[in-house]
Image: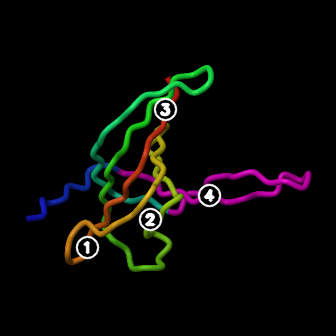
């Protein structure tokens, strides 16, 4: 049985856009697409050393109301959610329930410690 979903966090869905840097290269900027209400649940986490810093990675399951395929408001991999200063990179998206009323976004938050 699927548990009821409580969409109690307001997240901004952002899409990466490549912008010319004027010197023949490009940079990536994040453009807001819209705001979605979500349920955010932390999953497993781990910590590892990377050169001179310690990085912790935590996975999240973020459930949002489904949008039609192809709609700009439908989250997809390589986009991200922003909650203030927190950023959740979307790794994969799957249907949450058999009726496809909700989507589960499998995401990762990376924080420098």
| Circle nearer the N terminus (2, 3) | 2
93 shown above or below 107: below
Q: CA distance from mark 4 to mark 1?
A: 26 Å
Q: CA distance from mark 2 to mark 4?
A: 12 Å
| Circle nearer the N terminus (3, 4) | 4
What residue is shown with label 2?
Answer: 75
Contact, CB < 8 Å: mark 4 with mark 1? no
Which range of residues does the magenta coloring cover? 10-33
What residue is shown with label 3?
Answer: 111
Residue extending furthest toward the top = 52
Q: CA distance from mark 3 to mark 1?
A: 31 Å
* Left or right, 26 with reference to 75: right
**Occupied quadrant, residue 75:** bottom left
Contact, CB < 8 Å: mark 3 with mark 1? no
Where residue 19 sits in the image (x, y, percent)?
Answer: 76, 57
Q: The residue tagged with tag 3: helix, strand or loop?
A: strand
Q: CA distance from mark 3 to mark 4?
A: 19 Å
Where residue 74 sits in the image (x, y, percent)?
Answer: 43, 70
Q: Nearer the viewer, mark 3 or mark 4?
A: 3
Pointer 4 local density, CA inside 10 Å: few below 14, some 14–19, many at least 20 = some
Most frequent secondary structure within the magenta stretch = strand
Q: Indicate yes or no whether the magenta region holds residue 15.
A: yes
| Circle nearer the N terminus (2, 4) | 4
Q: Indicate yes or no whether the magenta region holds residue 80.
A: no
What residue is shown with label 1?
Answer: 101
Residue, x 21% and y 70% (percent of image)? 97
**Camera-nearest residue between 46 and 33:** 46
Where residue 98 sits in the image (x, y, percent)?
Answer: 20, 75
The color scheme shown is rainbow
Q: CA distance from mark 2 to mark 3?
A: 22 Å
* Left or right, 9 with reference to 49: left
């Amino acid at each position: 049985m699927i548990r009821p979903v409580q969409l109690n966090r307001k997240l901004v869905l952002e899409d990466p856009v490549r912008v010319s840097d004027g010197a023949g290269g490009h940079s990536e900027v994040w453009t807001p697409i819209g705001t979605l209400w979500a349920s955010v649940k932390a999953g497993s986490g781990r910590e590892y050393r990377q050169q001179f810093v310690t990085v912790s990675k935590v996975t999240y399951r973020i459930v949002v109301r489904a949008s039609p395929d192809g709609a700009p408001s439908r989250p997809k991999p390589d986009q991200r959610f922003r909650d203030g200063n927190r950023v959740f990179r979307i790794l994969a998206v799957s249907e949450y329930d058999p009726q496809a009323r909700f989507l589960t976004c499998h995401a990762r938050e990376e924080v420098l410690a």
